[in-house]
Amino acid sequence: MACELMACCQFFDDKMKNLPTAAEYIKNRRCLDDYESCSRFRIYQKYGGESLPPYLDPDDTEEVEKALECLRKKRG
């Protein structure tokens, strides 16, 4: 099963457009296989995709925590 965000994931449009081989590797490894552990997917699941940071690397757990904290503060 593939990640439901794959078709519109800004990570690939913003950070990987000049690295097609690396993008394909990440898509195969993360988006088509282990998407539940992807940082972007976890934030999407928890917050419904609102304000999903486009810079967020799928494997960067430190950035996930920063993004989640920011979203928590915004929501009050």
Image (cartoon, rainbow, N blue to C red):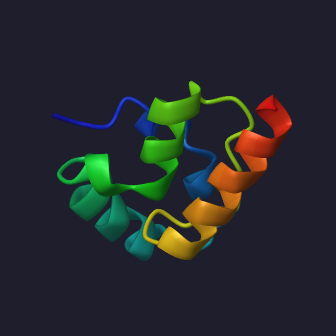
Q: What residue lies at 57% left-to-right and 61% top-to-bottom?
A: 64
Quadrant in the picture for the C terminus: top right
Residue 6 lies, in percent from the top left, at 42, 39
Most extreme residue toward the front is 76
Residue 54 shows in this picture: no
Quadrant of the frame with the N terminus: top left
Name the residue furthest top.
48
Name the spot of residue 46 as percent of width and height, x first: 50, 33
Which residue: 78% across, 30% down?
Answer: 75
Quadrant hosting residue 56: bottom right
Residue 59 is drawn in which quadrant? bottom left
Task: Give the residue drawn at x 71%, y 41%.
Answer: 72
Q: Is 9 placed left or right of 67 in the picture?
A: left
Q: Nearer the viewer, residue 62 or 17?
A: 62
Seen in the image, is 13 located left or right of residue 31? Answer: right
Residue 45 percent across, percent down from the top left: 45, 32
Give the total of numbered labels: 0
Residue 55 is situated, as x and y percent measured from the top left of the image, at 70, 62
